[in-house]
Amino acid sequence: MRVSLVALSVMILLLAAWPQNSFGASDIETLCPQERLRLGERMYREGRLPSGKPMNAAVTGALPIPGTAFSCESCHLRSGLGSYENSVLTPPANGAKLFSTLQVYSSATHEGRPFSRSAQQKMRYFPTPISRPAYNDATLARALREGIDSGGRTMNDIMPRYQLADEEMKLLISYLKSLSSEHSPGVTDSTIHFATIIADGVSPEERNAMLVPLENFIRSRNQTHFWDPRAGSRSTGYRSRVMAETSTGSQEVAVRKLSLSTWVLHGSPETWRLQLEEYYRKEPVFAILGGLTSGTWQPIHQFCEENRIPSIFPITDFPVISHTDWYTLYLSKGFYQEGEGAANFLNEESKTIIQIVRDTQEGRALSRGFLDTWRDFGHQHPVTLLLKDGEVLTAQLLQQANPRELPAVYVLWDGLGSLRALEALTVGKNRPALVLVSSLLLGRSVLEMDAKLRDFTYLTYPFGISPTPEEKIRGLSTMGAKSFNFEANTGAKARIQQQTYILTTIMNMALIDMRGNYYRDNLLDVIGMLMDQNLPLYESLNFGPGLRYASSGCYVVQRATSGIVKKSGWMTH
């Protein structure tokens, strides 16, 4: 279960001492505006003073802890637009809202007594309004230091009281004034502009598998979630502005259409950066939706990170694996994730582990996921045999990897040809204890696997599987039956169609929940606050602040005449 941000906040304890830092007020005063904003942003996001030391925070009745554990972003989110979780509503903290009169809302308690559960449910959509005046610099500084709002009311106890020197307070307030103050690039009075990206090497069938449903989504949403005030009753969307505003929760959603451009990248990945910059110069977009390449996504990922452009669910088996990047959300870790699954499955294995890796992008990604996770478990690097492009697996190579010819566990990151060679070369006493292979890498050739190979071959499988009758009876899986279908889930066209359906479903939810607050960070915040989803293809899609890979698990399965046998539960790392 995801731990609530608010629940974590309640655990934060008091830091009583004022900061003793070497970054004095005179130093702050000499900074250029850009550097002042950068330092204010760090205070908001990381809870660090200009000196690099933690800000001091106090929560009523608590004991001291480092202030970095209680940053503004942790509750008010990266966009500053606040959140609602566990019946506690955190109001906006961005300049556009702080410095104007606002209806703020009560939390789950009233005069010290909790509201009933049914009342709390209603408050999620119809919170009790309390009007407060606009803040100014002085009242905002008081709110941050003393927890007293612009109307003179004492704030909730979980709102920290920050002990900041005057110049430090000016830095933070200056950043709050700039935070989500103007709509992001790609948003005009009439349109929200999106783009998708397709690189050379993508087949026409794969291109259409993504583009057709994505374009249908844009067209359908413009017809059903849009009311043109100039068209009146002739509009093809809502019958009236009132209907549009009521359904979407915002007047702004009702009067903006969506547009989608296709950015086609030519040549090698090394040349993509200049092409992306030219596309973006001509047409700034709010976000990148989906996208297809035949290989790496890394240059696009880097471009989006540096330009702070959300990239939502690019369709790639080679995502960038990062714990710190923010602007790209992936459906999964691709091949890397299957490597993680293999290491999870073999963690307690006592037999010798031998990894055989084809020196391709796929093989390297699988091996990296396996080795990173294997080391996390505290194991030594396994024996690894690297097969060059075109090199055939031979008895001599296997002898080098397993000189004692003992039964071993082989992790084989290669195709069906090497699997068959391994079966032919390991007979008698050195027959494999088991062989782990990648279902994504084998693709449809899994269907061609000989019966004799199935005995000792296990597959990493990062997709959903229908629950067995026994599991249904035991209540282990009751929602959203998943089909184990190598044809559909490893076939490129069908998988792309399912991934695009997931993308459009999540985007539809996010656009409604944004309620006209068209800031890029808010798009990512809103997706991060969605409930976990049970949609086609994956076992489950998990969302939460900071999560960058929606599906993060893997099964290990074995082929059988009647279908498959699960050899593990859903493993995550």
Image: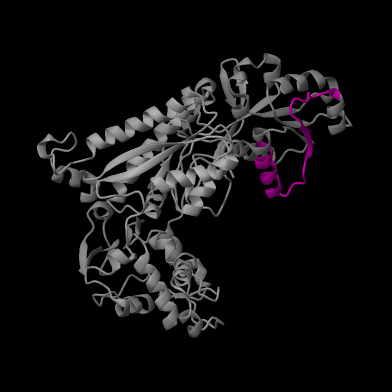
* Percent of width and height locating residue 196: 43, 38
Residue at 49% in and 30% down? 471
Can I make out residue 345 in this image?
A: no
Please tell me which residue lies in front, 101 or 1: 101
Please tell me which residue lies in front, 130 or 182: 182
- Furthest residue in direction left, as rendered: 233
The region drawn magenta spans 366-395
Residue 493 lies in magenta, yes or no? no
Residue at 44% in and 26% down? 209
* Percent of width and height locating residue 111: 25, 69
User: Is 329 left or right of 362, judged from the image as shown?
Assistant: left
Residue 180: which quarter of the image?
Answer: bottom left
The image quadrant where one finds the C terminus is top right
Can I make out residue 121 in this image?
A: yes
Classify 127 as above or below 165.
Answer: above
User: Is 463 left or right of 150, judged from the image as shown?
Assistant: right
Residue 220: which quarter of the image?
Answer: top left
User: Is 160 left or right of 404, judged from the image as shown?
Assistant: left
Residue 390 lies in magenta, yes or no? yes
* Percent of width and height locating residue 567: 62, 30
Classify 318 as above or below 57.
Answer: above
- Furthest residue in direction right, as rendered: 404
